[in-house]
Image (spheres, helix red, strand yellow):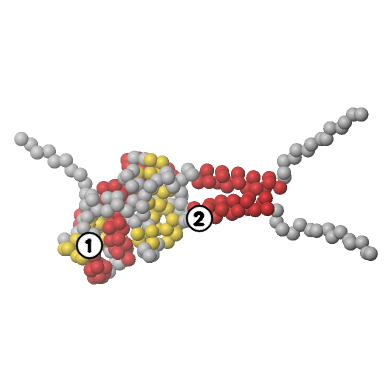
Amino acid sequence: MKIRRKIMKADVPSVAMGDIAFNLLIFFVILARASDDSHVKWQPAQGTRLESTRGTKVSVIISRENKLYLNGREIGQMQLAAEIEKYLGDLPAGERTVLLKVHNEATAMFYEPVIESISQAGGDLVHVLDEIH
Amino acid sequence: MRPRRALSKLLVEPAAVATGDIAFNLIVFFLVCASSQPDTGRRQDLPASEQTKQAEDKSKHIELALTRQSNVVTVNGEHVRMPDLPQRLRRLLAQTPRAEDKVVVVKSKPDVPYQHWITVTTLVQDAGAIITIQREEERTVTVGN
């Protein structure tokens, strides 16, 4: 007598597909966000009556080591104004916000030329600060 | 004896396998939400920098000199303690009736920390003045024989 082999079915559980897709989506969202300036080390200064800012295209950071970054990329002081102008392009007034994130112990010899460059590029300057509690 | 009817039991509890997935997804969701908080800051309107300077106009403006000392500033050459600064600024600005003339020229020594600069310029802004930065320029002086 011939013994029939039992056919085993090996299906991928379709229930998990949604979860996998969702996790992949989040993974890529996080990867995309990793290209911002979150890797730069700086401690904000404190201020009062602050407003929240959203949808800005340009952020400039002076780090703890007094290094200058434009949108997360290290840049020299001399190129800053031209590069900001490139990013801002022909944006209308009100949409030309430039976030300035300066380490609280940075000195005037570093932040004043940056403020001047932002002003030269026609950016609307917003100092990123921490609220005093 | 009446035969006992087999009750078809419905699965009412969630599948235990999925709980881990749900928990993980929730953690990731809140992590992403927390990391996307908007920046808070203070807008500062600076006049566009110009190479040409009008000496006669500058003489009218209030000059504020900052040093590393965070408890004192110099207003028009006079030392003023930080708590007295808002009042002093308001008094000086009241002397200029036109809003566009209410300009404060901020001169900082190269070693002035950002925190001190922000504190002072916030007070100037709150007093209703326009801030202008005047940077100390490096000059090379050649001394002849």
Q: Visible in this render: residue B35?
A: yes
Q: Earlier in the sequence, mark 2 or mark 1?
A: 2
Q: Amino acid at mark 1?
A: Asn
Q: Amino acid at mark 2?
A: Ala
Nearest to the observer: residue B18 or residue A127: B18
Between disc 2 and disc 1, the foreground one is 2
Q: Is residue B75 above or below residue B29?
A: below
Mark 2 → mark 1, Cα distance in angstroms: 37 Å
Mark 2: which secondary structure?
Answer: helix
- Name the residue located 29 percent from the left edge and 47 percent from the top edge: A110
Local crowd size for mark 1, using a 10 Å CA cut-off: few (<14), some (14–19), many (≥20):
few
Relative to A92, A26 lies left or right: right
- Give how far across and how far down residue A116 sits, in percent: 31, 49
Mark 1: which secondary structure?
Answer: loop
Q: Visible in this render: residue B99?
A: no
Q: Which of the 4 image quadrants contains residue B144?
A: top left
- Give how far across and how far down residue B12 sits, in percent: 74, 59
Dot 2 and dot 1 within a common chain: yes
Return the residue at label 2. Answer: B34
Return the residue at label 1. Answer: B71
- Give how far across and how far down residue B10 sits, in percent: 79, 58
Nearest to the observer: residue A117 or residue A11: A11
- Name the residue located 46 percent from the left edge and 49 percent from the top edge: A57
What is the chain letter for disc 2? B
Toward the top, the furthest residue is A1
What is the chain letter for disc 1? B
